[in-house]
Image (cartoon, rainbow, N blue to C red):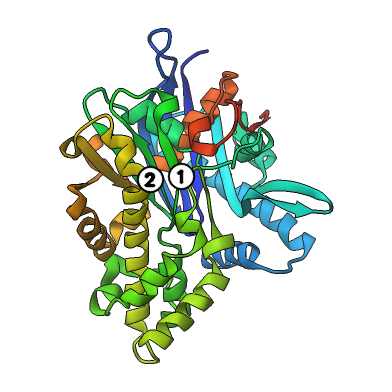
Amino acid sequence: MKSLVVAGVMSGTSADGVDVAICRVSPALRAGGTPRIKLLGHLGLAYPKTLRAAVLGAMDAEAISVAELARLNWRLGELYAEAVARAQEKFGVTVQLVGCHGQTIYHQGASEKYLGRALRVTWQTGEAAVIAERLRVPVVSDFRPGDLAAGGQGAPLVPMLDYCMFRSAKVSRVLLNLGGIGNLTAIPAKADANGLMAFDTGPGNMVIDTCMKRLYEREFDRGGAVARTGTVLRDVVEKILEETYFSALPPKSCGREQFGETFVSRFVAMCRKAGGREGRDKDVVATATALTAASIAQAYRRFVLGHVGQAAPLSRVEFVVAGGGTKNACLMRMLGAELEPMGVKVRLIEELGVPAQAKEAIAFALLAWLSWSGLPGNVPAATGAPRAVVLGKITHG
């Protein structure tokens, strides 16, 4: 094992763009320790509109041609390679390894019957051979299948980074990422990797963004400006929070399969019936924003509070938020108001020295280094896998 400069490449379920985090990842200083990660630079690039439309179409399509999927796979490979090249140039470093999560177009973490066999399946697209050839460095990609094959849900995978970078002997930490989906990692003070809890809480920005696209023809609610002027339809929020996913015990994971276009159609219809009629679209967006905040708070109350409270009094629990959702001021206010009665104060991950938008990309830089070093990258307590496994597939440049 040796120190490497690694580019982590992440494009999430919001499908709004790609983040590249260039990191120096080094072996642990002592036996039993964890790898050390230093962020050298972060670059975020938006998807071109036509490419974003193609990605979203692939995610939500009931039927799509094989040719379209093949072309999208190769086009994303070119985009990821270009993004890493631009990051190298911007920060004046030479990348030695790339870890590319790829774009998730389908993820089914729970077993379902298909052709006579119960299966868990996942599909991340973005051709690694293109990245390896353009940059002439090895690429680790397709991280989720190894955990799925071992009996896990293939998600969440960020907890390995959370444990390596943010565990503490003095405070318990809950680390929330607000991407398209909300996911959190709870690490009690002094806990080892087996003592953490991690799972997807439900929608992050996904339902808000889809409502904005459908009702306003905008990609997202900038700063929460629309939600701020609307009225939250509480009956709708409470009704949805009674649904199966929110009460299911961790470990659990979700995506557009649960909270994509089909869910939003039903959600908007519920809002219309409850009073968010035509001409009151802002109420629908406000309710979608409140749903995200309330689902996170409910998950904390039901599953996390007792877990972290065993190690520290409530005053010693830090609730740290990262991801694109931190830019939505209305969402952050709602989240703070939901958590405050439980004695929880929300902090931004920048206070711990990490840019909010860079965290997941940093995670895949770490996971690539672990895979290249022959070390496991999943956390069984988070994914439900019975054992730790080496993740990813290596494409040599």
Residue 335, horizontal then vertical, whole percent: 26, 58
Residue found at x 27% / y 26%:
168
Query: Within 10 angstroms of label 1, few (less than 14), some, or many (20 or more) residues?
Result: many
**Residue situated in front as seen by the camera: 123 or 381:** 381
| Nearest the eye: 243 or 325 | 243
Q: Which circle marks residue 174 in the picture?
A: none
Q: Earlier in the sequence, mark 1 or mark 2?
A: 1
Residue closest to the far right: 115
Report which quarter residue 352 is drawn in: top left
Of the pair 156 and 27, the residue shown nearer to us? 156
The Cα atoms of the two marked residues, 1 and 2, are separated by: 10 Å
Q: Position of residue 222 (x, y in %)?
A: 32, 68
Would residue 261 be found to the left or right of residue 26 on screen? right
User: Where does residue 69 sit, x and y in percent of width and height?
Assistant: 72, 58
Q: Where 368 sits versus 101, above or below?
A: above
Would you say 373 lies left or right of 166 here? right
Residue denoted by label 1: 199
Vertically, is 271 above or below 6?
below
Element on which disc 2 rests: helix
Tag 2: residue type? Phe
For the view shown, which residue lies furthest in the top direction?
31
In the rendered structure, are the residues bearing label 1 and label 2 in contact, judged by CB atoms less than 8 Å apart? yes
Local secondary structure at mark 1 = strand
Q: Inspect this view and state whether residue 199 appears.
A: yes
Residue 96 seen in render:
no
Disc number for residue 303: 2
The three-letter code of the residue at mark 1 reads: Phe
Q: Is residue 86 left or right of residue 127?
A: left
Residue plotted at (73% across, 66% down): 64
